[in-house]
Amino acid sequence: MKRHSHKIMYYETDKMGITHHSNYIRFMEEARVDFLEQIGWPYEKLEEIGCFSPVIAVSCQYKTPSTFGEIIYVEVFVEDFSGARLKIGYKMTNAAGKTVCEAESEHCFTNRDGRPIRLRNSFPEFAKVLEGLSTKE
Amino acid sequence: MKRHSHKIMYYETDKMGITHHSNYIRFMEEARVDFLEQIGWPYEKLEEIGCFSPVIAVSCQYKTPSTFGEIIYVEVFVEDFSGARLKIGYKMTNAAGKTVCEAESEHCFTNRDGRPIRLRNSFPEFAKVLEGLSTKE
Amino acid sequence: MKRHSHKIMYYETDKMGITHHSNYIRFMEEARVDFLEQIGWPYEKLEEIGCFSPVIAVSCQYKTPSTFGEIIYVEVFVEDFSGARLKIGYKMTNAAGKTVCEAESEHCFTNRDGRPIRLRNSFPEFAKVLEGLSTKE
Amino acid sequence: MKRHSHKIMYYETDKMGITHHSNYIRFMEEARVDFLEQIGWPYEKLEEIGCFSPVIAVSCQYKTPSTFGEIIYVEVFVEDFSGARLKIGYKMTNAAGKTVCEAESEHCFTNRDGRPIRLRNSFPEFAKVLEGLSTKE
């Protein structure tokens, strides 16, 4: 799996001179989209076949600030996957290898009408891929 | 017409210590939404009845920077309205009365499917209100 | 304490038709800034006297989506305050009284150079106010 | 000169299902930063040597909407450069070669204290590069 990389833009900094903390939540999404593409289930396709995955929780621990011009590398891993919920972990590091932040997001799955679905029943092939990637023992 | 007011948030500043210039384009939208509400045609209602108004052009001249904690006042006026196009002007000032920026946006009107409509035919009452407000001679 | 209110803007929605989840992290900041102002220690003043409070962690559990035009009410409370760290809780509700999300942020305190400070030593009056508001038993 | 490319993120879309118009102002900045890097004067370096270039005006004409997952290509060109002011043009196209938008930004130059400088006097080598790239006849 190739790490996602994001170059910090000027518009992502704040008057403290560093990347505004809310943007890392966006980088998580970016990295997740990249990850889904790499495992063969791009989010655009998922939405086309009627599989939506709203975010039900996020958390982020900030370790080292970043700023304009820096490249942040984001590792993504499936922390846990039950038929109904998906927990994704993120580790962001800077060019020097220092941890920028560690984060998690949790997702459920719904159909086009927003009704919860069990991925194993509705999209068993996608469910199998996520199970295979789960790092939970 | 009551001016729209916006308090600059920390997340709207950049590492230069001032409000990032892209945010004023968002304040224009905020003020436009407020204006439509004040004239009795809130954008939520317009979308409900199938009247969409995509932005086809924006421009903004920045005069005085603003920063975190400041309140910006936005005056909105209908600069020109033909049956098909609407041009809106914006003047933003700070608490000291200094001009922060002057801006314009242009809009067309479409139905739910994105097809262009002439407002005078499809929504004549809304068209009449805009005509009455037009400052063009 | 007056709840903070935020009207959802069009630019805060995403193609799912709802408020993008990353924006709630920004509403937390907005509500925190409002809270600090209400308790007599506005963030602008804190920065002026050399008291910075970087975010070291955030978490948010999303319960009910919101969308364009809705007003979200944010209650803020001091969950815990040690001399070095501050934990703030947030409860966001919609007009119908339903919980939109529950969230937390953690902060440390630094001087102008980014060096950690103990609030009780450097700014004892501000520390006393936070202690008085702490809901921790 | 290599065109800048930007993949549209989910957080950049709005409830109309398309890229929110304010984001193109950010893509202009991204492309400008990329352009400055390519011509050997990265913005990080410019700020280090005390050369700031605030945006004094932007304009954008939207031609074709874009949405989540699409890649937008941005061409950047120096439209005009006097010693004091710089006008940059942008042409954004989608994968099918259709024009997404055409835009312009205007910049002045200041020192660290925000005082206007004439680039030809203060940073003659950078001024020479911009003059050489100017497409104005």
Image (spheres, coloured by chain):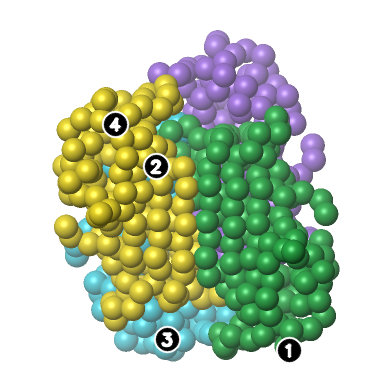
Chain colours: A green, B cyan, C yellow, D purple
**Residue type beneath disc 1:** Asn
Q: Circle 4 sits on which residue? A: C119
The label shown at residue A121 is 1
| Mark 2 vs mark 1, CA separation in Å | 43 Å
Find residue D85 and report its horizontal and vertical position in percent. 52, 28
Q: Identify the element where label 2 is drawn.
A: strand
Residue at 48%, 32% in the rendered image: A17
Q: Circle 2 sits on which residue? A: C107
- Locate residue D73 relative to residue A86 in the image: left or right: right
| Mark 4 vs mark 1, CA separation in Å | 54 Å
Q: Are marks 2 and 1 in contact (CB under 8 Å)?
A: no
Give the foreground label among 4 and 3.
Answer: 4
Q: Are the residues under badges 1 and 3 in a single subunit?
A: no
Residue at 66%, 48% in the rendered image: A91
Residue D75 visible? no
| Front-lying residue, C46 or D47 | C46
